[in-house]
Image (spheres, rainbow, N blue to C red):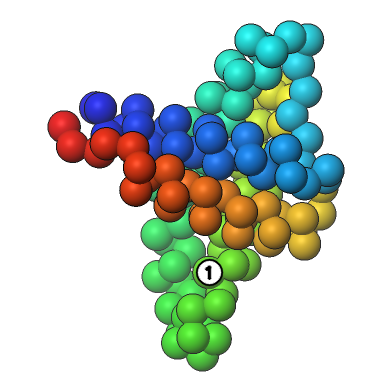
Amino acid sequence: MKNFVVKTIANAGALAVAVWILDKITLTGDSTGKEIGTLLLVALIFGVVNFLVKPIVKVLTFPLFILTLGLITLVINALMLLLTSWLADKLDLSFHVEGFWTAVLGGLIISIVSWALNVVLPDKD
């Protein structure tokens, strides 16, 4: 359980960095507390999408992994971020990613920051 909380916090931090760096990834709220709550909910959605959908997509696109030497991962991460944005919109959360190329860059930023945070944060149960 502790590992899940740590990964969700790392995802929230990575999403916050992407929102801060990229103008076309937006997160709005009436107050800072509401923005943090929205960010945590979006991080939770992002984690669930990566846990449930991403492995299926990776298996289905395995030949493309070989063909592109793994660069298809950038596209898959972008699609997972766009799916998270779509789900957040359906759940009436104020998180939006505008466009595919913004999602590619956002996915890259989130991957790097999430990796760095997972190295620093404890993950043992």
- Which corner quadrant of the image does residue 4 belong to? top left
Residue topped by disc 1: 73
- The residue located at (24%, 27%) in the rendering is 1
- Mark 1, secondary structure of its residue: helix
Q: Position of residue 52 (x, y in %)?
A: 41, 47
- The residue located at (34%, 48%) in the rendering is 119
Residue extending farthest to the bottom is 67
| One can see residue 86 in this view | no
Q: Position of residue 111 (x, y in %)?
A: 52, 55
Image vertical order of residue 66 relative to residue 99, above or below: below
| One can see residue 42 in this view | yes
Crowd rating for badge 1 (residues with CA inside 10 Å; few <14, some 14–19, many 20+) = some
- Report the quarter where the C terminus lies: top left
Say what amino acid the circle numbered 1 marks.
Thr
Most foreground residue, 36 or 21 = 21
Left or right, 116 with reference to 77: left
Image vertical order of residue 15 relative to residue 37, above or below: below
- Which corner quadrant of the image does residue 5 belong to? top left
Q: Position of residue 12 (x, y in %)?
A: 53, 33
